[in-house]
Image (cartoon, rainbow, N blue to C red):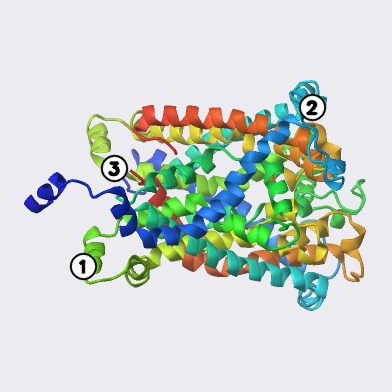
Amino acid sequence: MATNTDAIVVKKPPLSVRIYKYRYFYLMAVPVIVLLLLFFYWPMLGIRFAFSTYKLKHITSGKGPDYSTGLGNFKALFTDRFFLDSFRNTIALSFWNLVFATVFTVVVALLINELQHEWGKKFVQTVLYLPHFLSWVVVASIFTLLLSAGADATGSDPTTVGFINAVFLKLGLIDKPHSFLTETSTWRPCWYIIQRWKETGWGTIIYLAALSGISPDLYEAAEIDGAGRLKQTWYITLPSLMNTILIVFILNLAKILNVFESVFVLYNDLVLSVSDVVQTYTYRKGIQGNDYGYATAIGLFKSVISLFLVTGADYVAKKIRGYGIV
Amino acid sequence: MSTKFSFQKGYRARAVFVILNTIFFIFMMICMIVPIIKILSDSLMNHTVYGMQLIPDEFNPIAYSYIFTRDSLRRPLVISIYTTIMTTFLGLLISTIGAYILIQREMPGVKVFGYMLMFTMIFNGGLIPTFLVMKKLKLLNTLWAVILPMALNVSNLVLMRSFFEGLPTSLFEAAEIDGCTPIGTFIKIVLPLSKAALASIGLFFAVAAWSEYFHYVMYISDTTKYNFQYKLRDLFADKQEAMEGIQINLKTLQSAAIIVSIVPFMFIYPFCQKYFMTGITMGAVKE
């Protein structure tokens, strides 16, 4: 220990010596830095296209983007009905999904925690985690088949309707098959439920970890004081979980605008009005419509809001648990 | 805590709760498993059996032989396997190198390197500028457009760093004194000691690469370069090209394609669950 303190007193060697000492590390860093610059930092320069008119004809003619537009793209943005719709949809979908996720995941985590049988608990967890690992394409494909209304929508032939329609018909919940994913009234509930199907189990992990960290002494003390199970949950478990719940909520709140793939694989032209989100709109405008300038402007608008959300979340997370998220 | 299971007075409410809780989880597990069983069952019957039938009335693997023999379906499968292997290998390479550099606290410039990595997690150029960069690099319609951006995964890199930070620094010092170069230390000491981390993070890369869809949507329009996920999605879009020359029942083929894309994962999942979990808990204890 003493030699260590002595070493600190010694003056730092000059920069060139230190750089020379780490020469192999700089060599090793090259591939990482190249990828970082190419795929993450170079695109940031492309943000300037947001202030230009840049379409396919500008590329084919070799002229490059036309910067006389200035802020025109952003002015157009706020009067673009489709963009405003997509923005509203993004907020609504993400927000309600976040609310359902928080409530449902916490309740399921509390109930898993109550399972006494060790092996049974492991088994339940294994099964519930599973859908998390299925890709969105697979999940969308599964539910497209299960939610299908079948060959003919009159439901005259019960063997051609999808599984979920068949179950609902049998239970008498509906009187004819519905094409749930192509009707504006049912698309959103389906999306929320599919999200829960896929992510609930996985979401419980963080709460279960927090639950296992609660001191058993607290419960013993409560028991001596005559508190039943429900009271223990209400006065010990939930308050102890509050920090974790808040942190998870805030972290997800920061990502509220990032929703893309789950919508992209499940939406269709018939339900565009309730399902189109900012990212899918950007994709259709930019990649399919080749309106690069305008689409970059949408993307920039989204990124800037996200940046504020993330730094805000980071600040709040630091307040709550002492360390941030980035 | 009282855990006695009994219907005697005083324990009754608890017993009722335990039963209801068990029923709830049996119901949850049915909700998770039945969709997959239904698809598996439908994939084995070469006729549209919708409705509630969960047990196949015939065993007809024609849809599977279709997938493995027809070029338009086998090629995407091969591409999926290829990109999964490449992404996992390059991803692990990049993450371990990056993490190894990040733990060199004394190295001039390492802080800037760290900040540059972290910044990409909170801000990026967006879909379109990234697309235009790919276009400029002439990577559109090549599999590199999918593999390379996935190989640099900052959250996996940070996870790897927290693993490396757990290694005793005395080991590095000892290696240095014995005349080991940093690259030698990396290969002979760091990597062999991080097998669990390599397994976990390798699995993350493999699952992500196998499931990858977004990068194909963005950068690949050449139908011969689709991966299996993209092909699966294509089977559901009422596109004429996708259906061309398919003589078996479409629903059967769709079901079989779903099963093929989840089977590799289903096989490794029960055995590798602990590795998936390591990653999560590791992220949770980050100080």
Chain at numbered mark 3: B
Q: Is residue A102 left or right of residue A90?
A: left
Q: Quadrant of residue B195?
A: bottom left
- For disc 2, the neighbor class at 10 Å (few under 14, some 14 to 19, many from 20) is few
Of mark 1 and mark 3, the one earlier in the sequence is 3
Query: What residue is shown with label 1?
Result: B177
Q: Position of residue A285 (x, y in %)?
A: 80, 38
Q: Quadrant of residue B87?
A: bottom right
Mark sitting on residue B52: none
Could you tell me how far apart the alpha carbons at marks 2 and 3 are, in whole angstroms? 73 Å
Q: Rounded to the nearest whole Å, what is the CA distance between mark 1 and mark 3?
A: 55 Å
Q: Secondary structure beneath disc 2?
A: helix
Helix, strand or loop at disc 3?
Answer: loop
**SS at circle 1:** helix
State the image coordinates of residue B159 (x, y, percent, origin top left): 42, 53
The residue labelled by disc 2 is A68
Amino acid carrying mark 3 in the image: Met
Q: Are marks 2 and 3 in contact (CB under 8 Å)?
A: no
Judging from the image, mark 2 belongs to the subunit labelled A
Disc 1 versus disc 2: nearer the observer: 2
In the picture shown, does residue B40 fall above or below A9?
A: below
Per the image, the residue denoted by label 3 is B1
Identity of the residue drawn at 54% across and 60% down: B205
